Amino acid sequence: MLLARELVSYISRQIIKKLTPQWIESTDAQVASEFIAGVVEDELAVEDRLNDEVRDLLSQYSEYMRREGVSYQEMFRRIKNTLITQRKVIRASGRDSGDPMKLSRDKINDISHKIVTALRKSREFRLKRDPNDVRLELVRVMTELLQAEEKVDRAARTKIRSQKREISEGTEEWDLLHKRYYAEELKKLGIDLTR
């Protein structure tokens, strides 16, 4: 998934914290944040399933790619773009669409529509303002949180690059260092993903 479950959970808790009681009412903050996290995770899983489908398709075309000299990455991108267009899926990754954040602005807007729709259908919630105003506030809060996360991720990557020797991204050492530096940077901002 594009965002770690811990980050999705944190963002959901922060949404509930910032939107209650002025924007929405809920009987239980924990249930509300889990509800929102479920909507976000379901929406992010759409692209994960699409990626899995593309990988399955590519396994069928390995001979063609070898014969035509087409790289795996190029063919993956072509097939994924075709499926995204055919199915009218909104691309989740911001980096794929030129946004600096992990989630594209379009995906944040799409998720906000789905959250507001789910909140309106649920008996656990009551919107205290116009649904579109609530949605716009959701977009603002999510964008703010994702921008803070992007700064943390960038700072962690900078620390890794500043090591005396080069550490390649994707290696176990890089992953461990990133996780450690990422947690340190989150603490500097006062963000605890467990709360």
Image (cartoon, rainbow, N blue to C red):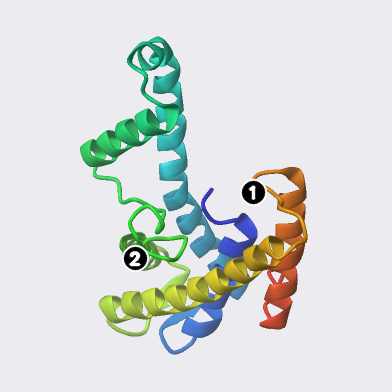
**Residue at the image point whose x is 40% and y is 75% from the top:** 138
Residue type at numbered disc 2: Arg
Quadrant where the C terminus sits is bottom right
> Which quadrant of the figure has residue 106?
bottom left
Residue at disc 1, secondary structure: loop
Q: Nearer the viewer, residue 18 or 49?
A: 49
> Which quadrant of the figure has residue 189?
bottom right
Q: Position of residue 158 (x, y in %)?
A: 64, 67
Other-residue count near label 2 (Cα within 10 Å), few / some / many at <14 / 14–19 / ≥20: many
Distance between mark 1 and mark 2 Cα atoms: 26 Å
Residue at disc 2, secondary structure: helix
Residue type at numbered disc 1: Glu
Q: Is residue 30 visible?
A: yes
Q: Nearer the viewer, residue 10 or 191?
A: 191
Q: Is residue 27 visible?
A: no
**Residue at the image point whose x is 49% and y is 64% from the top:** 36
Residue receiving disc 2 = 105
Residue receiving disc 1 = 169
**Residue at the image point whose x is 41% and y is 14% from the top:** 66
Of the image marks 1 and 2, the number of the one nearer the N terminus: 2
